[in-house]
Amino acid sequence: MLLVTSTKVNEFITFAHELAEASGNIVRRYFRRTLTLESKDEERFNPVTQADRESEAVMREMIEERFPTHAILGEEQTDTNRGASMRWILDPIDGTRSFVMGLPLWGTLIALYDGNTPLLGIMNQPFIEERFEGSAGGSFHLRGGMRTPLKTRGCRNIREAVLGATDPAMFSGQIFGNLAERVKMRRFGGDCYLYCALAAGWLDTIVEADLRHYDVLPLVPIVEGAGGIITDWNGKPFSCETEGEFRTVATGDIHLHRTILKILEDS
């Protein structure tokens, strides 16, 4: 891993916002329009749209022109330059199901990793013109010309916690039920928005499964930059080398994080 200066990180962050603008201009044109849906999986319906493909394509073109030696790991196209240390991770529309239903609970995810070290993460929601940014310099909410620092809230007691998960179908058996029955309130739906809401201090914990690297890695800098914790169900951090299913536990409080890991272990 090479030493990346703060000046260089700021350059990358500026460029990541340029990617968000370019992809947002494309995705916004397709939102709440009649779309042709295809499925990427044969066994279950996993929707993809022209908006997904065009959005990722324009971001790839920009990265390849600006940083031709960097790797690109995206959802819709084949990974490139996989041996490179600097790795861009792209999810053009995280929450495609919400997107095709006309619900604004989706976003474009962008990250840059130096090896396995997260340098930046962006979640962009172009329809309501809202963006979340995370790095070692902190996490921020950007909207209406304002750039507001984000901070997770403390919640040690699971009985007072607000829990989020995108879909109960992610879980098997009583795993989620054993956790959900202990919290104050739970809410399904949200995809990437859940993690940004946690970074903003609007909820306390997220537990999910059946995710992939492009679903999770861009959100790690946003959660951690706001003071939160995000690991797998064994308490291990995520990296670009993590393979297979990503199972996440994200919290704003380390004590709550330990409690949830213990419940998952017992389940």
Image (cartoon, grey):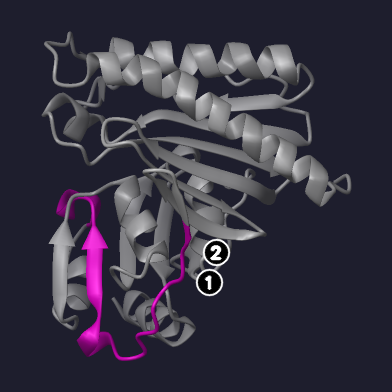
Residue underneath mark 1: 227
Quadrant where the C terminus sits is bottom left
Look at the numbered discs 2 and 1 and tell me whether their residues touch, using CB distance below 8 Å: yes
Quarter assignment of residue 45? top left
Relative to 102, say whether 146 is above or below: below
Q: Is residue 29 magenta?
A: no
Inter-mark Cα distance, 2 to 1? 5 Å
Q: Secondary structure at mark 2?
A: helix
Residue range (magenta): 148-171
Query: Seen in the image, is 127 located left or right of residue 261?
Result: left
Seen at 62% across and 46% down, the residue is 120
Whether residue 53 is visible here, answered yes or no, is: yes
In the figure, is residue 210 to the left or right of 100?
right
Who is closer to the viewer here, 221 or 238? 221
From this viewpoint, which residue is outermost toward the front?
145
Give residue 224's mark.
2
State whether residue 154 is above or below residue 238: below
Under mark 2, the amino acid is: Glu
In the image, residue 81 lies at what x, y percent? 72, 21
Q: How many marks?
A: 2
Q: From where the camera sits, is residue 44 visible?
A: no
Residue at the image position 34 percent from the left and 74 percent from the top: 264
- For label 1, the SS is loop
Residue at 29% of width from left, 20% of height from top? 28
Q: Which amino acid type corresponds to the residue marked 1 in the rendered image?
A: Gly
**Percent coordinates x, y for residue 109 in the rendering:** 45, 37
